[in-house]
């Protein structure tokens, strides 16, 4: 077969063109790599592939049509990805095929996704090859200068040594340029055109990824964390002993599973999973709590036979693994102080070998883990643990959630103020962090939690955000527990918001649009209620507190949606209209 070389955009041979002969298997893998849409393949890595493929000497493949076809395919794929900025696999393939005059019979277009191990191998091969190109070209220069040094006389040796030193420094620079480190943590910003465009584009692609934030089933919490739990961030719940930190983590784990139905892992060949590393409650205790949390009116697992238990977990708890609910939950127990943060990397690697991709780590709790730089000073060690969790979150590009204690002063405040029926959660803050302020310094988000009850004895979880690296919409919410359950928080993503802003200060929710600040496409794509809401002025909320008598304000809660037109104004409430409002709005 004769291939028209007009299809091949080989550049003129440069000094770094090299006669490297790639085998068909490697070229097939590179062909799959260039059209793979795995999130592990980033812009910088495609640029490295382009640098690599154009460094090959074109004459090496002139007499081998099979290899030349693959070289053409790879270059056309790079053109589609880098020049036309195509990201959809079907568009990329069509763009490639439209400019070819031969059939692509060397790869299966329907099954081209590489797993994370294969992608890692390709990227390492490219990186090493780029360095090899340089060393290959530099070898003759090194041989020449070394030969002249050995044969020179004393009078000229100084000049040759300086020439040799300059050559070494030049080669060091070439090594640095050829080396490929594609971790997100290694992004480097500069206004130089080559670095500016690459870094800004890379940053935009990362931030615009709809899977970068994991939402929960609580609207108020989503707003508090700026739309969802963001990859690369470390979040911590802080509360006094026995207040429900572990239960809150379990609620977050369950809600992340349920409310991110269309999450796409970075590696399409892996199963996304949330990993709960419990260092306080055993796996048996955790499963027992999970059962009581997700099963309505649970009487405990042992009150049912095993078939009923499994059915209830799958049907009532929606704990299934299928195309409609693809996120798995993995729970492991490790005893107190038995591991340091290095275990997290080993755990991820083990799970990857089992076909998983960890998309969120939940660790319970911080003080039970050791720092790799273990020290007898607990204050310093806790700060180091958070630093190491941050490094892990950034390296794996996932959110990490942990918890720790507040101090004795916080416990005293809770005990004293609960009897006075005030919002004690509002009084808890940075000064109540136990042991170490280094914890707060190194966290991305810190949320103080506390349990409170209304006048009817209904249980609520108070959450106060005392640190957030990004501007957020809310810093204090009170989320109710499901009636009759002391461990399951109300999920209000598909309904009107259920949280309040105070239990004892006569304040309520500010009116706002449903789903505001929540950016995850995973749930928005399935939320028919929001999709069908055509009126942007339609809100779920609570009317302002109106008062006929300043000493006796009327508190009104709306339990059905209210739709106002664009000219809506505050209604004029009189004594005569109270009964009518109660009938129309079902005010309690």
Image (cartoon, grey):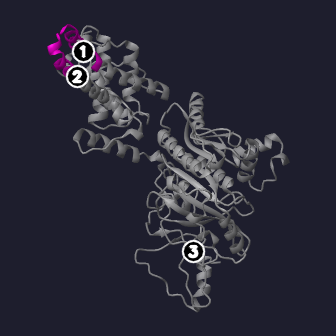
Residue 230 is situated, as x and y percent measured from the top left of the image, at 49, 50
Q: Quadrant of the C terminus?
A: bottom right
* Mark 2 or 3: the one toward you: 2
Residue 260 is situated, as x and y percent measured from the top left of the image, at 54, 47
Residue 157 highlighted magenta (yes or no):
yes
> Is residue 138 found left or right of 222 in the rendered image?
left
> Is residue 289 found left or right of 191 in the rendered image?
right
Marks 2 and 3 sit apart, C-alpha to C-alpha, by: 72 Å
Residue 278 highlighted magenta (yes or no):
no
State if disc 2 and disc 1 touch (CB < 8 Å). yes
Residue placed under numbered mark 1 in the picture: 142
SS class of the residue under badge 3? loop
The residue depicted at 49 percent of the width and 33 percent of the height is 268
Residue placed under numbered mark 2 in the picture: 167
State which quadrant residue 349 falls in: top right
- Label 1, residues with CA under 10 Å away: few <14, some 14-19, many ≥20: some
Marks 1 and 2 sit apart, C-alpha to C-alpha, by: 8 Å
Q: Nearer the viewer, residue 501 or 124?
A: 124
> Is residue 146 found left or right of 420 in the rendered image?
left
SS class of the residue under badge 2? helix
Residue 445 is situated, as x and y percent measured from the top left of the image, at 52, 56
Q: Is residue 515 above or below residue 580?
A: above
Q: Nearer the viewer, residue 368 or 444?
A: 368
* Mark 3 or 1: the one toward you: 1
Answer with mark 1 or mark 2, whichever residue precedes in sequence: 1
Q: Nearer the viewer, residue 522 or 575?
A: 522
The stretch of residues the image draws in magenta is 134-163
The circle on residue 508 is 3
Q: Nearer the viewer, residue 349 or 215?
A: 349
């Amino acid at each position: 077969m004769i291939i028209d070389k007009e299809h091949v955009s080989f550049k003129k041979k440069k000094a770094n063109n090299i006669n490297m002969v790639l085998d068909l298997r490697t070229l097939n893998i590179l062909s799959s790599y260039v059209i793979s849409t795995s999130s592990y393949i980033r812009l910088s890595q495609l640029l490295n592939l382009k640098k690599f493929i154009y460094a090959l000497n074109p004459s090496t493949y002139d007499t081998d049509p099979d290899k030349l076809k693959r070289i053409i395919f790879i270059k056309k794929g790079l053109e589609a990805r880098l020049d036309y900025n195509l990201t959809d696999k079907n568009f990329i393939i069509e763009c490639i095929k439209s400019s070819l005059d031969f059939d692509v019979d060397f790869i299966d277009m329907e099954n081209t996704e590489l797993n994370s191990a294969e992608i890692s191998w390709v990227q390492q091969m490219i990186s090493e090859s780029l360095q090899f190109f340089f060393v290959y070209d530099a070898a003759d220069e090194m041989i020449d200068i070394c030969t002249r040094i050995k044969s020179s006389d004393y009078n000229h040796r100084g000049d040759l040594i300086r020439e040799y030193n300059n050559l070494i420094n030049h080669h060091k620079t070439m090594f640095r340029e050829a080396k490929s480190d594609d971790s997100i943590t290694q992004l480097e910003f500069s206004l130089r055109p080559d670095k500016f465009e690459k870094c800004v584009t890379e940053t935009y692609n990362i931030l615009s990824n709809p899977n970068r934030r994991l939402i929960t089933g609580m609207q108020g919490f989503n707003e508090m964390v700026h739309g969802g739990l963001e990859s690369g961030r470390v979040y911590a719940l802080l509360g006094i002993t026995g207040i429900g930190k572990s239960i809150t983590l379990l609620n977050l784990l369950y809600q992340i599973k349920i409310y991110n139905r269309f999450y796409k892992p970075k590696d399409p060949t892996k199963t996304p999973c949330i990993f709960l590393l419990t260092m306080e409650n055993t796996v048996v205790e955790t499963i027992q709590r999970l059962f009581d949390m997700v099963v309505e009116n649970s009487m405990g697992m042992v009150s049912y036979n095993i078939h009923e238990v499994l059915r209830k977990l799958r049907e009532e708890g929606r704990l299934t693994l299928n195309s409609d609910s693809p996120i798995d939950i993995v729970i492991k127990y490790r005893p107190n102080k038995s591991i340091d943060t290095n275990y997290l990397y080993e755990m991820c690697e083990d799970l990857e070998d089992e076909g998983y991709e960890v998309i969120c780590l939940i660790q319970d709790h911080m003080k039970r883990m050791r720092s790799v730089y273990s020290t007898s000073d607990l204050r310093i060690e806790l700060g180091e643990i958070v630093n190491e969790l941050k490094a892990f979150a950034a390296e794996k590009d996932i959110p990490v959630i942990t918890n720790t204690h507040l101090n004795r002063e916080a416990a005293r405040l809770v005990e004293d103020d609960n009897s006075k029926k005030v919002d004690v959660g509002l009084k808890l803050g940075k000064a109540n962090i136990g042991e170490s302020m280094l914890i707060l310094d190194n966290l991305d988000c810190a949320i103080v939690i506390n349990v409170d009850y209304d006048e009817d004895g209904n249980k609520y979880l108070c959450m106060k955000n005392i640190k957030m690296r990004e501007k957020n919409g809310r810093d204090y919410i009170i989320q109710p527990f499901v009636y009759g359950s002391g461990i399951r928080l109300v999920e209000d993503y598909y309904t009107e918001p259920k949280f309040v802003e105070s239990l004892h200060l006569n304040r309520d929710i500010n009116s706002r649009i449903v789903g505001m600040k929540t950016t995850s496409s995973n749930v928005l794509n399935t939320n028919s209620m929001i999709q069908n809401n055509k009126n942007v002025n339609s809100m779920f909320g609570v009317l302002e507190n109106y008062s006929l008598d300043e000493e006796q304000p009327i508190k009104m809660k709306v339990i059905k949606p209210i739709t106002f037109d664009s000219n809506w104004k505050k209604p004029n409430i009189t004594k005569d209209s109270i009964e009518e409002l109660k009938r129309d709005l079902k005010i309690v």
